Amino acid sequence: MPAIKALPLNCTLKSDPSETSSTDAMITVLADAFRDRDVAVSETIRVAALNIRPGVTSDEGEGDDWPALRKKILAHDILILGGPIWMGQVSSIAKRVLERMDAFLEETDDHGRMPSYGKVAVAAIVGNEDGAHFCSAQIFQALNDVGWTIPAVAACYWVGEAMGSTDFKDLNATPEMVAKTAKMVASNATHLAGLLSQQNYPG
């Protein structure tokens, strides 16, 4: 069986890739868990550093970085969509990614399958406020609408003290339950991606 490949997208609002991000820290926890399952995890892409134009097509014209990112996403078996909680919701950057995938609805093959069929998606969420479950609900419903498969236990998240000043990236160690959940997310997603790579949906 070919190696399973995963692509992490960091949907932090910080556009400078050199600026530390709690979303990166959570993605690292998940990436390590996937690598323990022999998944080839690609380098994390900082979406805010790209020019992902608004719209719902796969190419919004000159200067749009989405076509190249779309190609990378679809070259992988697993999507790790990471994002922070802002105002109780997933970041606007993550929403932009989801909106651009709306084009998949019209990009079906002869069996009516979207290009995301047979591919698995999980979420990495961090924040200093309530909303992790709401954010995962937003992410998973949108991704499922455009053809992604969501495994059992598909979200790894950490929520700090409400209005607190401690970020996930500033913790001295990964909390035990976060590490345990990351292993479960990676195990289930890798298993499912392996099955789908051998037999895709019939359409």
Image (cartoon, grey):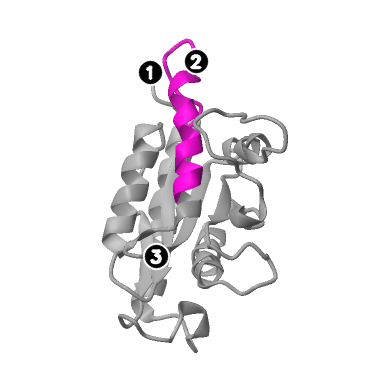
- Which residue was labeled with disc 1? 203
> Vertically, is 182 above or below 198?
below
Q: For the magenta stretch, what is the residue range?
A: 95-116
- Which residue was labeled with disc 2? 109
Q: Is there any visible trace of residue 84 in the rendered image?
A: yes
Residue 55 badge: none
Q: Residue at x 29, y 64 (%)?
A: 131
Mark earlier in primary sequence (2, 1):
2
> Vertically, is 126 above or below 101?
below
Name the quarter where the N terminus is drawn.
top right
Q: Which residue is drawn at 29% across and 51% down?
A: 137
- Which residue was labeled with disc 3? 86
Mark 3 and mark 2 residues within 8 Å of each other at the beta carbon: no
Looking at the image, the residue that sits furthest to the bottom is 172
Q: Position of residue 22 (x, y in %)?
A: 51, 73
Q: Position of residue 103 (x, y in %)?
A: 49, 27
Q: Residue at x 67, y 41 (%)?
A: 65
Q: Where is residue 19 in the image (x, y as percent from the top left)?
A: 65, 73
For marks 3 and 2, give the one nearer the viewer. Answer: 3
Q: What element carries label 3?
A: strand
At label 1, which amino acid type do we have?
Gly
At label 2, which amino acid type do we have?
Asp
Q: How crowded is mark 3: few (under 14 residues within 10 Å), some or many (20 or more)?
A: some
Q: Is there any visible trace of residue 151 in the rendered image?
A: no
Q: Is residue 111 magenta?
A: yes
Instruction: Give the image quarter of residue 21.
Output: bottom right
Name the quarter where the C terminus is drawn.
top left
Mark 2 and mark 1 residues within 8 Å of each other at the beta carbon: yes
Is 74 situated left or right of 117 in this image? right
